[in-house]
Image: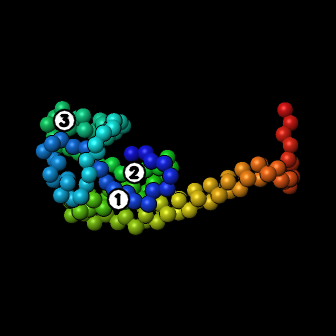
Amino acid sequence: MPQRGIIDDYPIYYAAEADMVETLEKYGIKKVEKGIIVGPEATILNEALSNKLKAYALFAPVLEIPTPEAGAAILEVLNEIYSLNIETSKLIEEGKEIKAKMLELAEKAQQYQQQQQLGEPKEGYNRYFQ
């Protein structure tokens, strides 16, 4: 579920057959209200429906960059549903590092844009030739 801006909360959503709704919602997972499912999730759900299997897909908000925290949030739900013990702290830490790098790049881009608008001279080459 692509989002814009920085995401700090990763709610989990599901898409499933009606007979799976009660099971998933008791874990606090919310139903995807509208949208189109594409990619491997769509293929798996289609095959499950065709073969009368009880399948579902879990989704979390993501950025247009790697979002390990979203994966960690889904794994934490799967840990709860299936009594697993998959460690997610490394994914969460990687996500924080990616966010910090993205914020640093955004600040540098903003500073560069301000310099361009103010017309401040820059060191080195400052002209483009065609």
Q: Is residue 76 above or below residue 3?
A: below
Q: Could you say which is closer to the camera, residue 117 or residue 42?
A: 117
Tell me which numbered mark, 3 or 1, is placed earlier along the sequence.
3
Where does residue 125 sit, x and y in percent of width and height? 86, 48
Where does residue 104 sit, x and y in percent of width and height? 62, 60
Residue 28 lies in what quarter of the image? Answer: bottom left
Q: Is residue 24 above or below residue 36?
A: below
The residue that disc 2 covers is 61
Task: Please tell me which residue is depicted at 68% across the width and 56% down the height of the picture.
Answer: 108
Residue 110, which numbered label?
Answer: none
Q: Is residue 53 left or right of residue 65?
A: left
Task: Please tell me which residue is depicted at 46% across the width and 66% down the height of the picture.
Answer: 93
Query: Is residue 57 visible to the viewer in this orientation of the structure?
Result: no
Q: In this view, does 115 lie above or below 54?
A: below
The residue that disc 3 covers is 49
Task: Please tell me which residue is depicted at 12% across the width and 45% down the height of the picture.
Answer: 19
Task: Please tell me which residue is depicted at 86% across the width and 43% down the height of the picture.
Answer: 127
Where does residue 17 sit, x and y in percent of width and height? 18, 41
Identify which amino acid the numbered label 1 is placed on: Ala
- Image label count: 3
Tell me which numbered mark, 3 or 2, is placed earlier along the sequence.
3
Identify which amino acid the numbered label 3 is placed on: Leu
Q: In this view, does 120 lie to the left or right of 32?
A: right
What's the coloring here? rainbow
Mark 3: few, some, or many residues within 10 Å (few <14, many ≥20)? Answer: some
Q: Could you say which is closer to the camera, residue 101 or residue 48?
A: 101
Tell me which numbered mark, 1 or 2, is placed earlier along the sequence.
2
Which quadrant, please, contains the C terminus? top right
Residue 73, which numbered label?
Answer: 1
Identify which amino acid the numbered label 2 is placed on: Pro
